[in-house]
Image (cartoon, helix red, strand yellow):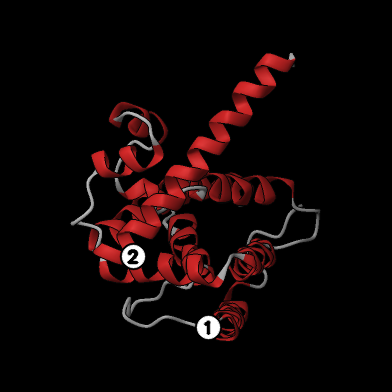
């Protein structure tokens, strides 16, 4: 990579980070619907088009990095060691996400959870992104377990395990509830324990 290319990539990352940070701050202060893309662009001193170049939808400004996290999960599943079940891999990934969320500044973490809790379109977008990766996870599980086309088990397992990632972000069925880190971990452990009793032997890497 040349110095110029490296500089451009660094500027792109900085611009993306700035846009997401400004958006979350403005959404948390004034409400998601009250803030326009034009206002975010102006605050970052870029054009509206630039914002959409980085974020396809307004909701994606809140969910910056979600694609990368989900891609990491798929890679972790593909690369998990022999003898490890899908359940163990999913739990480890969920705990890593929870740790990352805790490492964020408290204001940023609280703002993110407030926006998700109070904005149905953001919560729906989060679920939409999860479904794309549940599709990939379903394909992996079907392949590894030699499931036939009529077997709904891989889809059901992928969908059930997808809740672990959302829990790790501090997002539950009751969006009004904002969990502490301790509550997030306790929920991951409780759900894992419940799944373990029925899924411990499913999709163990051969």
Q: Which numbered circle lies on residue 18?
A: none
Pick the quarter of the image with the N terminus.
top right
Residue drawn at point x = 42 percent, y = 33 percent: 54
Residue drawn at point x = 68 percent, y = 50 percent: 76
Picture quarter containing residue 113?
bottom left
Left or right: residue 33 versus residue 62 is left
Q: Which numbered circle lies on residue 180?
A: 1
Can residue 146 be seen by looking at this rendering? no
Can residue 165 be seen by looking at this rendering? yes
Residue 153 versus residue 164 in the image, above or below: above
Left or right: residue 174 versus residue 205 is left
Residue 199 versus residue 58 in the image, above or below: below
Q: Where is residue 166 in the image (x, y as percent from the top left)?
A: 46, 66
Q: Where is residue 179 in the image (x, y as percent from the top left)?
A: 47, 82
Please, which residue is most extreme toward the left here? 34
Q: Position of residue 7 (x, y in %)?
A: 66, 23
Camera-side residue of 108 and 147: 108
Q: Distance between the residues labelled 1 and 2?
A: 18 Å
Q: Residues within 10 Å of mark 1 (few under 14, many from 20)?
A: few
Query: In front of the other: label 1 or label 2?
Result: 2
| Element carrying mark 2 | helix
N-term mark: 1 or 2: 2
Picture quarter containing residue 195?
bottom right
Query: Could you tell me if the residues under marks 1 and 2 are in contact, i.e. CB atoms within 8 Å?
Result: no
| Element carrying mark 1 | loop
Q: Mark 2 points at which residue?
A: 28
Camera-side residue of 98 and 91: 98
Q: How many labels does the image show?
A: 2
Please, which residue is most extreme toward the right here? 82
Q: Residues within 10 Å of mark 2 (few under 14, many from 20)?
A: many
């Amino acid at each position: 990579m040349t110095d110029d290319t490296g500089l451009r990539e660094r500027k792109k990352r900085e611009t993306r980070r700035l846009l997401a940070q400004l958006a979350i701050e403005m959404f948390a202060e004034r409400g998601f619907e009250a803030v326009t893309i034009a206002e975010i662009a102006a605050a970052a001193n870029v054009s509206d088009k630039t914002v959409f170049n980085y974020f396809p939808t307004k909701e994606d400004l809140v969910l910056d990095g979600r694609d990368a996290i989900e891609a990491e999960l798929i890679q972790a599943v593909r690369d998990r060691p022999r003898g490890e079940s899908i359940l163990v891999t999913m739990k480890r990934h969920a705990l890593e996400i929870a740790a990352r969320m805790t490492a964020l500044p408290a204001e940023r973490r609280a703002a993110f959870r407030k926006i998700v809790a109070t904005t149905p379109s953001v919560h729906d977008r989060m679920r939409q992104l999860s479904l794309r990766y549940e599709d990939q996870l379903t394909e992996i599980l079907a392949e590894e377990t030699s499931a036939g086309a009529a077997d709904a088990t891989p889809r059901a397992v992928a969908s059930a395990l997808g809740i672990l990632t959302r829990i790790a972000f501090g997002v539950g069925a009751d969006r009004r509830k904002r969990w502490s880190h301790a509550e997030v971990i306790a929920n991951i452990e409780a759900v894992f324990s419940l799944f373990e009793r029925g899924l411990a032997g499913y999709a163990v890497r051969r």
